[in-house]
Image (cartoon, rainbow, N blue to C red):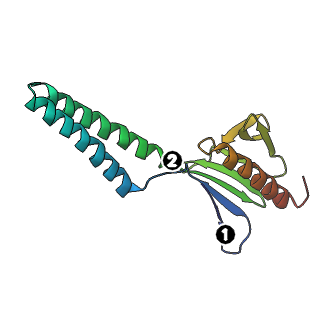
Amino acid sequence: MIEVLSPAPDGSGTQLRLRPPRALDARQFVQLFAVLAGAMWLVATLGWLAGNVFAPVFALLHSTLLAAALRALWRSGERLEQIRVVPGCVEVIPAASSTPAFRAHPWWVRLVVEDEHVRLVCSGREVEVGSMLAPAERQHLAKTLEGLLAAANGCNR
């Protein structure tokens, strides 16, 4: 998901906030866990009634692993990447830090799109942006960045 924001109060420059797409919200994740774990516990109870004394142990193990997997999946969707393009600077800020991983003047920044990878390159430094996005969203990101860099330079690219 690509959100376009205006970073400065005077309206100069643009900020892009990139997030991976999510198919479910938090409530739906909990419901998914409840349905899957409930089905497992139903089968384990039927197995226990049929004489399998280890069925509840495996159901408990399954529920724990399922909860851990769904939690890891939810946390991976919380990634965030910010790209700021203002007249004097282009910055890429990854989610984990508040310091820019890439900073350069827009005049010297080159946009490189190869094999569905979008990179910003300047003076031997490069950073890949939008790696968590779907291929169609990466193409949209490349077009948006191309326009923003051209506008920040004051010329057409």
Q: Pick whichever, 83 or 57, lies toward us.
A: 57
Kind of element beneath mark 1: loop
In percent of the image, x 59 and y 43: which residue is there? 132
In percent of the image, x 74 and y 69: which residue is there? 12
Q: Pick whichever, 155 or 50, lies toward us.
A: 50
Taking the image as shown, residue 133 lies to the left or right of residue 90, namely left
In percent of the image, x 22 and y 31: which residue is there? 61
Q: Quadrant of the N terminus?
A: bottom right
The amino acid beneath tag 1 is: Ala
Residue 22, given in percent of the width and then of the height, sits at 50, 51
Residue 137, given in percent of the width and then of the height, sits at 67, 49
Taking the image as shown, residue 96 lies to the left or right of residue 128, namely left
Crowdedness near tag 1: few (<14), some (14–19) or many (≥20) residues, C-alpha within 10 Å? few
Determine which of the numbered discs, if any, sits on residue 149 in the image. Answer: none
Residue 37, given in percent of the width and then of the height, sits at 25, 41
Q: How many marks on residues?
A: 2
Q: Which residue is mark 1?
A: 8
The amino acid beneath tag 2 is: Arg
In percent of the image, x 13 and y 36: which residue is there? 45
Determine which of the numbered discs, if any, sits on residue 79 in the image. Answer: 2
Residue, far bottom: 10
Q: Nearer the viewer, mark 2 or mark 1?
A: 2
Q: Is residue 27 above or below residue 142?
A: below
Taking the image as shown, residue 30 lies to the left or right of residue 45, namely right
Q: Quadrant of residue 64?
A: top left
Residue 114, given in percent of the width and then of the height, sits at 77, 35
Q: Pick whichever, 128 or 102, lies toward us.
A: 128
